[in-house]
Image: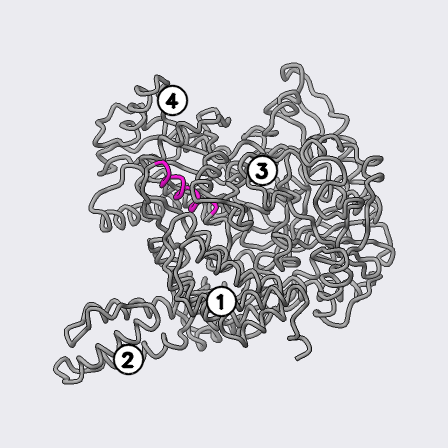
Amino acid sequence: AHALEFQTLQEWRSGGRGLSPVEATMMVAIPEIDGATGPMVYGGRTNGGRSMQSDAERAGRLADRIGRLVSLRKTPIRDRKVAVVLYGFPPNAGAVGTAAHLGVFESLHNTLNAMAAEGYDVDVPDTVDDLRRVILKGNAEVHGQQANVAARVTADEIVARDPYLSEVEAAWGPVPGKHQTDGRDVFVLGAHFGKVFVGVQPAFGYEGDPMRLLFEQGFAPTHAFAAFYRWLRQDYAADAVIHFGTHGALEFMPGKQAGMSGACWPDRLIGDLPNYYLYAANNPSEGMIAKRRSAATLISYLTPPVAHAGLYKGLAELKTSLDRWRQMEAEDATRGDLAQLIQTQAAAVDLADLDPLWDATAHDQVAGLSAKIVELEYTLIPHGLHVIGAPAGSEERRDYLRAIGEGQGVALDDAAIAAACAGKGDLAPELRAILQRADQLLSEDTETPALIAALDGRFIPPAPGGDLIRTPDILPTGRNLHGFDPFRLPSAFAMQDGAKQAGKLLERHLADSGALPETVALVLWGTDNLKTEGGPIAQALSLMGATPRFDSYGRLAGADLVPLDQLNRPRIDVVMTLSGIFRDLLPLQTRMLAEAAFKAAIAEEPDAQNFIAKHARAYAALHDVSLEEAALRVFSNADGAYGSNVNLLIDSGAWADEDELADTFTTRKCFAYGLNGKPVRQEGLLQSTLAGVELAYQNLESVELGVTTVDHYFDTLGGIGRAVKKARGDAIPVYIGDQTAGEGKVRTLSEQVDLEARTRVLNPKWYEAMLEHGHEGVRHIEAHVTNTMGWSATTGQVQPWVYQRISETFVLDEEMRRRLATLNPRASAKVANRLLEAHERNYWAPDDATLEALRQAGDELEDHVEGVSNWAAE
């Protein structure tokens, strides 16, 4: 809790942002490093800053929250009522009970058993499948819902008890609205297990409505969403709530970015209810939003074990032939025959064409194939999902430790790992200590005890967020995540590495196109920067030829230019698109980037050496605006809004053509941030700048995440690629900077999608590990397919063979099709429908036989969803 020191109460109340950048840094971000959580403004300066006073409403909320924590601590365990919130987005897609990197139902079953052992009054179903069935089935079909209906809230109750009804009705129409309702009552989805209620969070409400997705900045949650949280607080009267996994929608509801007031929806919805949030350890940035906007105390969980992708089917056979080639003498008479065999095998797995035919001189082609096979075999992939309450086994620990070693540039075999874990061996003492500590902590369950302690109202110690491979200090998990000190980003190391990675990007584009780009579109996320001490920020600065400026206390104060004679190349014009989370968490860095662009624009340097100044001068002259306005290069959402919504349009299928995706992106992301850090709508400037963009780029920072794993990548990088194509009239190359291993590598988007298709979605090692988690595993497979189509829609750079092989693997194979349908009928039907949609939108062209088989399989899966299949009887 804090009083306002650097702004007045009046400025805080009236501003859409809430806390000023310095206020947010000093009073929220720095205390978080010590474990502070649930930040609350209780008063501050007034009358022009001359005196201090309390804010009665906020002070009252603070007192209520402390009172609820005291009550939670004092209430006997058996009398406590706990609510657990699962997510179900997108609705009716088999997505209920899925979360990033987490086997939700297995984790929930373990958690309920741990609570029962602790003395909570909880009825735990015998098996995970029983638990899942009670929540997802029950009376769901009777009411046409995606999960069991546990309670009904009548329209009359909502009218009588919702103090914000007018705001909700202005956005969603008369109560009870159209979401999660039968026209009379709003449904609360979930199930009771003794004194633990497991509920399903309602969806946003924008699904299938392209006009809302285009223009909505978020006026209010739906009637169903508001009723759900009011029911938890007042009707069910929970003593505490656990949001179960990364992540839901509560913290992204409309309101101030930081420093919530009584007018902010996250604050209204959670009220004084103690809020605990199981959160992936590798995602500190979105976790900070949950802490700051929904008063959540985070309890970190480990990301899945990682493993080398390995080779399978035709890829393994191809490697055998390549090994024979390397061992063969140059004058061997059968070398030409082997070259043709290798070519045929490579063509069968879509790694080569059959024309022209290879012969004994195909050294370059074979060498290129060998490099690809090595990359595929040794690419690190997530292996399954993490399960709360299930410590890593010996094999999983070896995989983790091997990856940690690779992250340190050291290749480890099993013997070296075993020696290090025993405190022996020839490794450097620092690395040996890291491995020994990690092995010990990975063998323990530290997450369930932390959750039990949180439900006692006890302090949860802080921990840095990040990837285990890069940041072994995230162990033990079960701690309250925080980010880095924002005054110190970007670090000196980040600046050094950022210059190196920016150079690789320019080298790749120079090799592909023959020229340096004048303008680059760069996507910046909060998560990637918090995990790398500001690495992507450093890349943006390096491209512009700028460096951060720190004051005498070592705190970030702005940006300075690097002299051209030190830069040794022109300043690249960089159009930066910030995620809403970057904007919220890193306001000082946002202003620094704007200052770097402005200083470059006003520098008295020749056009040939300063593309920022060249383009800003031209725009200012053409549109008769100031150079300061013409130099705006940092774009994001309006205050309080998140995402471009391109991902939601793709998922809903409610879009006519790709230009609609471009319009959605520019409408949502056209707010420019200048030297004062305040957003101003600049759609014309954004369109003009995008018309000059020659490449788009984003980093890939986590082994756990790929560009086809989550939809945020094509929502931002894909969205800007589509917007550039509309503005220019032609497509541009899209690059991915893979920073997950070694020195980093720049790939085209097409190369990255190919790599992920082969190492993940088509790889039995990946999908079999996913299917061990049943319902959730099928949903993750479906997400890969949808996200792949998202890249086709936004960039057009997905090779058709990807869709063909996905079809053969998951839909046209009858045994696999029935297996997926049994585990998750809705998600499996969505896989087939998405592949058909990709064909209908001309992203691939299967032959007639494949198309007919795909349609029949899709009809069969839809029948199964509707309950007219006889598979269960069989």
Q: Residues under labels 3 and 1: Cα distance?
A: 33 Å
Q: Which mark is residue 212?
A: 3
Dot 2 or dot 3: first in sequence order is 3
Q: How is the image coloured?
A: one colour
Q: Nearer the viewer, mark 3 or mark 4?
A: 3
Q: Is residue 726 magenta?
A: yes
Residue 326 visible in this rendered orientation of the protein: no
Circles 3, 1 touching at the beta carbon (< 8 Å): no
Q: Secondary structure at mark 2?
A: helix
Q: Which residue is mark 4?
A: 628
Q: Which mark is residue 687?
A: none
Q: Residues under labels 2 and 3: Cα distance?
A: 55 Å
Q: Secondary structure at mark 3?
A: helix
Q: Residues under labels 1 and 2: Cα distance?
A: 33 Å
Rendering quarter of residue 245: bottom right
Q: Nearer the viewer, mark 3 or mark 1?
A: 1
